[in-house]
Amino acid sequence: MEMGLNNKTALVTGSSKGIGKAIAIELAKEGVNVLINGRSYEEVEKTVKEIKSAFPATSPQNATADIVDAEQREALVKKFPNVDILVNNMGIYEIMQYEDVTDEIWEKYFHTNVLAANGLSKYYLTKMLGNNDGRIIFIASEEAVMPSGQMPQYCMTKSMLLSLAKSLSKLTKGTDVTVNTIMPGPTLSENVQQIIEGIYNHDHMPFSEKERQFMINNLPQSEIQRFIKPLEIGRLATFLCSPYASAFKGSPIRMDGGMVPTIY
Ligand SMILES: NC(=O)c1ccc[n+]([C@@H]2O[C@H](COP(=O)([O-])OP(=O)(O)OC[C@H]3O[C@@H](n4cnc5c(N)ncnc54)[C@H](OP(=O)(O)O)[C@@H]3O)[C@@H](O)[C@H]2O)c1
């Protein structure tokens, strides 16, 4: 514990699994009391117990809620009115052809990937400004700045998060509150692992070989030629939450394994 985060409280949305869970674990490692969120009470409870047994000095709590639902979001912030850190991680993604993206699907992605995070940020930012301290992190994607064309409905929402984070950051002027965005590249959450296993389900080879082939065939631009580990995103997020990162203001921060080919 050396990051100056001991005894802080963090709400990490979508943290019962995947990148969100890894962020929650890395924060707990630094003594943060994490509020674990997801829609399934049982799944959330499993993660809470796992974190409690790994970091018994912290107090992880069950923050089950469908945060896309405005009423459940309201109930959540009423139950946990004070947090030092908000990580807007929850997001949905799916490969889709542009022609298949109906107005309903555009709206669903906007509500899920943007408005849910905005609703929580609106509430907690006001509190953080009042305390002159706090951290908000949005989890976007390298697709926010480099749409692949394979998920137009998703990329739009991730680009929006960059803009939203900067607008909110403007409101933090002169305070110790920061609002930033992490843009992960392809990351090996359980969900992504299942997708890769599904693609190679007839081949009897170790996952590392499936990963290698997937990279060569589908992500040749990746400079690491492997998926990013959720833990790597978790470490970065933890640093951004620390007092050492107070000069990051409205920054889009790439941890994309070299996916984006440009310098800046
Ligand atoms: N994995 C990647 O390669 C990658 C790359 C770049 C960016 N990202 C971004 O990183 C974030 C996390 O991705 P991931 O791959 O870790 O996702 P994931 O494995 O699908 O995990 C999503 C988490 O969100 C929860 N969740 C889903 N809908 C929810 C809702 N309405 N309310 C509350 N919780 C909800 C899920 O639990 P329940 O289903 O039980 O609710 C789960 O805990 C997303 O924003 C994604 O766009 C991912």
Image: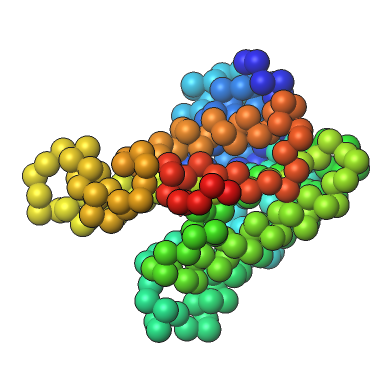
Name the residue located 40 percent from the left edge and 84 percent from the top edge: 99
User: What residue do we see at 45% from left, 51% from top?
Assistant: 261
What percent of the width, then of the height, locates residue 263?
Answer: 54, 47
Residue at 46% across, 29% down: 50
Horizontal side of 159 relative to 85 (left or right) equals left
Of the pair 40 and 30, the residue shown nearer to us: 30
Residue 166 versus residue 239 in the image, above or below = below
Q: Is residue 94 above or below residue 58?
A: below
In this view of the protein, which residue sits in the foreground, 23 or 169?
A: 169
Q: Write down the quadrant of residue 204 in the picture.
A: top left
Q: Is residue 171 left or right of residue 252?
A: right
Rendered-image quadrant of the N terminus = top right
Q: Nearer the viewer, residue 38 or 234?
A: 234
- Can residue 85 be seen from the camera position used here? yes
Number of numbered labels in the structure image:
0
Residue 72 at what x, y percent from top left? 65, 59
Instruction: Estimate the x, y position of residue 242 in percent, counting from the top left.
Output: 70, 28
Residue 13 seen from this side: no
Rendered residue at 69%/60% (across/down): 163
Q: How is the image coloured?
A: rainbow
Q: In the picture provided, is 49 more to the left or to the right than 197?
A: right
Position in image of residue 18 (x %, y %): 44, 44
